Amino acid sequence: MKLKNIMLFMGMLALVAVTSKQVNASVIFEVEPNDTLAAAQNIDPHFSIGPNPNVIFSDVVPWVSIVAPANNDTFDYYSFSVNNGGDVGIFDVDFGVGGVGSIDTTIALWDSLGNVLPFGFNDDSNAALGAAGSVSDLDPFLPYVFQNPGLYIVGVAGSPSTAVQGGWDLAGTTLPSLSTYVISVSLENGNQQGSQQPIPEPTTIALLSIGLMGLTVAGARRKWRKNC
């Protein structure tokens, strides 16, 4: 990697870090190997509440950001626990397209048995749906309401890729060598290590999620009509 790109990437990491008052709890690095569902990196201990302009609702919904500094032609998977049926999760990729090691990503959700969750997939999304870190419509953004408690997995792949039983279709696009991104996971009732902030009422989070989902669907429809 050229010195200029290294400096830019270090600047991106600094930006992620300084925007969070709880950086030790909420901003972590990807840990390899995490290229299969079985080897997914667990992020449960790292959720907390605190201001981060790159994470939507960061002051009211527990979140964690995972910095993937340099991929090596693989897929990435991260596991997390949902405590209650009806809990809301928000999955937002930042600094993929346009960042150092630019990569067009796609994301999907699986349960602990490897089943793809219905509607648990996003490739491109309107950048306006995310927070300050969302600067490209090619970076995924996915709000999701989980029907049941349990262990779930979010996977990141290059675009295009297809989510199938057991993980990404091996014919899909792996994350190229030295490609970089940051994925933020916000989760209602996520584990809050060291957080002193109260959790908002579930109805508040539900309303926020419904609004986001409406905007996501509207954006997808506009894109579909434009391509027809």
Image: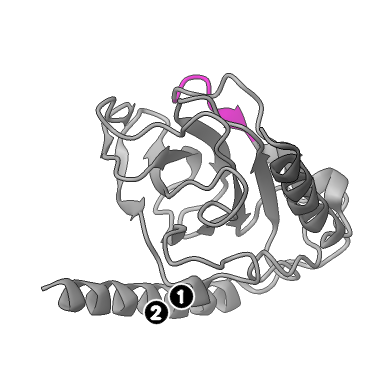
Q: Where are the magenta residues, as a range?
A: 37-42
Q: Pinpoint residue 40: horizontal percent, then vertical percent.
A: 53, 27
Describe the element under mark 2 as helix, strand or loop.
helix
Q: Magenta includes 137?
A: no
Total numbered labels placed on residues in the image: 2
Q: Which residue reaches farthest left?
A: 228
The residue that appears at 40% across and 44% down in the rendered structure is: 109
Label at residue 68: none
In which quadrant will I find the N terminus?
Answer: top right
The residue that appears at 54% across and 51% down in the rendered structure is: 96
Q: Pinpoint residue 78: horizontal percent, then vertical percent.
A: 55, 35
The residue that appears at 72% across and 70% down in the rendered structure is: 60
Q: Which residue is mark 1?
A: 212
> Between marks 2 and 1, how big is the CA–CA gap?
5 Å
Q: Which residue is mark 2?
A: 215
The residue that appears at 28% across and 71% down in the rendered structure is: 220
> How was this image coloured?
one colour
Q: Amino acid at mark 2?
A: Leu
Q: Is residue 122 left or right of residue 155?
A: left
* Relative height, residue 216 to residue 117 (above, below): below
Q: Magenta includes 39?
A: yes
Q: Amino acid at mark 1?
A: Leu
Would residue 193 be seen by someone viewing this image from the given angle?
no
* Relative height, residue 158 to residue 139 (above, below): above
Q: Pinpoint residue 189: horizontal percent, then vertical percent.
A: 64, 56
The answer to whether mark 2 and mark 1 are in CB contact below 8 A is: yes
